[in-house]
Amino acid sequence: MYKNKKNGILGISITIAILILIVIFSNREANTSFFENVANKLVMPIQNGLTYLKNKVSGNSTFFSDINNLKIENQELKEKNSELEQSLRELENIKTENETLKEYLGLTEKYGEYKTMPAYVIDKDISNYSKTIVINVGKNDGIKENMIVIADEGLVGHIISVTDNTAKVRTIIDTASSISCLMSTSKDSIVCKGTLDSNSELKAMYISTDSNIIQGDSIDTSGLGGIYPKGIHVGIIKKIVSAKNITDRYAIVETAVNFNKLNTVLVIRDN
């Protein structure tokens, strides 16, 4: 009995095994699709991620290329800008030279009765105690001490020292300067001296008691008692200062020349 039972169990087991094999072989293709699906679900996201990164890298490569092009263009613009600035400076220099030539031409025409030499102002010492300028002509150009220096507007001063290539000019606003002048309306004589307080004013003194001083009157050199020739414009009477004693009255003369902006002059070599 036990033997028959054992044989029955074995038979059932064999039958089950055969059925399992049949199921496995009959579903082999289905199982293959399942594993492929699993693999696809695992691999595709990775593949998609790699593709995205690749596209990103390609896009960044274009970005860096654009940045490099912008750098090159920026450098080219800088070079062009530098060239334009250089051209502008050259044009400004030409303009300045033309203006200087016009000034010289105007000066030589205005003071045609004198033999003159043009010069540039290369240094200034316009302070309270010393009001001198230095010009770029000297002994080698035939320049000597006491020669008169003028500008388009009028009298500048006279030369007090000379080197081979430069000359120092004491301006009329220097406190050591003294000029014999005439008032254009009355033709009365006055003496104009520089002051400590101003770079554009002179003090007119020794005014005759019966002289009629007019504000705004023109003042020119008289040609008397000094090195300055007659008829060079000095300035205008700006203010009349009265005093208890009429002999002490004086006037303030505003100089025709703006010494702070003085750049070109003429030296009178022969008057």
Image: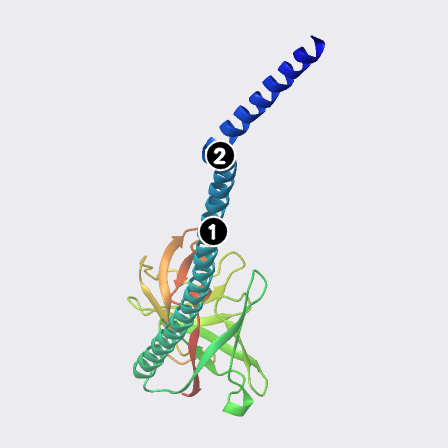
Q: Are marks 1 and 2 in contact (CB under 8 Å)?
A: no
Q: Badge 2 is on which residue? A: 28
Q: Is residue 236 visible?
A: yes
- Comes first in the chain, label 1 or label 2: 2
Secondary structure type for disc 1:
helix
The C terminus lies in quadrant? bottom left
What residue is shown at x 30% (from left), y 66% (from top)? 186
Report which quarter residue 10 is drawn in.
top right
Q: Left or right? Give the position of 150 relative to 24.
A: left
Q: Nearer the viewer, residue 191 or 33?
A: 33
Coordinates of residue 137 in the picture (x, y in percent): 51, 84
Q: Residue furthest left?
A: 185
Q: Left or right? Give the position of 260 relative to 114.
A: right
Q: Nearer the viewer, residue 53 or 82?
A: 53
The N terminus lies in quadrant? top right
Secondary structure type for disc 2:
helix
| Colouring rule applied to residues | rainbow
Numbered mark located on residue 60 in the image: 1
Q: Is residue 244 visible?
A: no
